[in-house]
Image (cartoon, rainbow, N blue to C red):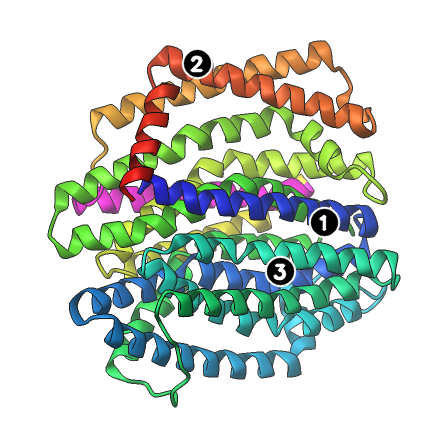
Amino acid sequence: MLRNLITVGGWTMLSRVLGLVRDQLLAAFLGAGPVQDAYQIAFRLPNMFRRLFGEGAFNAAFVPLFTERLTTHGKEDATRFASQALSCLSAWLLALTILGEVFMPWIIEIIAPGFNHAGGRFEMAVRLTRITFPYLILICTAALVAGVLNGLHRFSMAAGAYVSFNIVGIIAILLGALVFEDTASWTAYGITFSGFVQLGLLLWSVRRAGVSLSFPRPRLTVEMRAMLRRLWPGLMGSGATQLNLTVDTLISTLLPAGSISWLYFADRVNQLPLGVLGAAAGTTLLPVLTRHAAEKDVSGGQQTLNRAIDYAAILTFPACLGLLALAPEIMATLFGYGRFTTEDALSSAQSLRAYALGLPAFILIKVLSPGFFAHGDTRTPVRIGFLTLALNLALNLLLYKPLAHVGPPLASTIAAIVNLGFLAVILHRRAVFRPDAALIRRMLRILMASVVMAVLTLILARVIAPGLVMWHGLMRAMMLGLLIGIAGIIYLALLWACGIAKPDRLLRRLTRRGRTA
């Protein structure tokens, strides 16, 4: 599990780094204003579906059923089931895409109520979203094909294909800005084209794995009904975090121009550890927990969940505290160029700190959710999802006026913490989650090491680099890199001193896993 988690996490990390480059180009060429706001709405809608299907509900509904048929009936029967699911999903998505294109102005009025017709933000958002919306059918279909690969325990290409999204996006931004002088439109077209690239790579990979998917006539068979029963509740259960972020976007359209952009870039930095750790843990945990559940191995499932939390915490806690300590310096260094001013970077840093407070909760939700899905329970997470969505909306309405662009991310953080609490308590009552004494001790030591690291880093930044946010160019980037490097050394030293992680032991474990794979 650790080796697979590192494989998926490594590919996701590469994708996030390239995504960071893509976002830097967006900030430099579009800045933080009406055009950027309109583009972010156009990107948010299909991207929400990508995260829901690619990282959440569809994976939770399809992978256990596919794995079960592969184990009990063989590859031929599992391939037939996957083909039928592909056909039904494609038909439904095609209908949804057509309806979306037709009714797009009304959709934008719902998800961006603050976009009035004056100033051009509304019309631009409608035009750009019509360009990006076909990405929905491509990426959700790709999520099914990736689910087949995950069910076959071929995690590398399933995670690696998403790298192409950012490669195509970078090329599209550069073409739009430097050649055609229409950055927003070309970036939108790049999103849709990347869907074709991702789907093509995954279909090629699944064929190499010996599975030939087809498109039979869509029929609601018994197997499809079983998958749908798991799918629809899971959309809310496993996608609560993404839906909460969508609520944040909806509320942020009521704020002054530029607020959507500040929230977006803050969320993108927060998504780096969230995507790497959360998506990787959820993807690799589900097949393992499903096998333990099928074998009635309660103890094995508990130990697997505890170790996954341990692996996630050792990187999540320092990421959370590090972002809190250096948020202004990070945002200024990453995005403070071109049309994205220092003031924009500082405003975005305030939103980043609010998101970072909830980072451990966001990631541990991804870790605990497979504990329900592995046992075929998607109803409980959906009930919790409805509760936290209502809480997030209420908090957004309470906070967005007094706290402006800090209100929506803070509301999401509080809702995520409540969500995590409910998941943990219910899994504990069902004997699926039993944190042992070793896990609790390690979590406390990891948290202590992270706090000490963050405090020392903050002091060091004030001593050797005062006013770093106002520095420019390569010197600012080099100094931030030095601070982060020193923080990493401090953290590793503290982990070693606390007996949490010994580098030589971890290296031997990974090497042994690699040889036995």
Q: Nearer the viewer, mark 2 or mark 3?
A: 2
Eyeballing the image, is 28 above or below 166? above
User: What residue would you read off at disc 3?
Assistant: 44
Q: Are marks 1 and 2 in contact (CB under 8 Å)?
A: no
Secondary structure of the residue carrying tag 2 is: helix
- Name the amino acid type tagged 2: Leu
User: What residue would you read off at disc 1?
Assistant: 261
**Mark closer to the chain start, 2 or 3:** 3
Secondary structure of the residue carrying tag 3 is: helix
What is the CA distance from the residue labelled 1 to the residue labelled 3? 12 Å
Q: Nearer the viewer, residue 409 or 391?
A: 409
State which quadrant residue 134 falls in: bottom right
How far across and down, in percent of the image, does residue 291 sit? 20, 54
How far across and down, in percent of the image, does residue 297 sit? 12, 47
Eyeballing the image, is 420 above or below 482? below
249 relative to 389 in the view: left or right: right
Residue located at (56% from left, 19% from top): 487
- Name the amino acid type tagged 1: Ser
What is the CA distance from the residue labelled 1 to the residue labelled 2? 37 Å
| Magenta extent | 404-433
Q: Nearer the viewer, residue 505 or 208?
A: 208
Secondary structure of the residue carrying tag 1 is: helix
63 magenta-colored: no
304 relative to 405 in the view: left or right: left
User: What residue would you read off at disc 2?
Assistant: 494
- Name the amino acid type tagged 3: Arg
Residue located at (32% from left, 63% from top): 63
Residue located at (26% from left, 76% from top): 76
441 relative to 166 in the view: left or right: left
State which quadrant residue 188 falls in: bottom right
Eyeballing the image, is 40 above or below 416? below
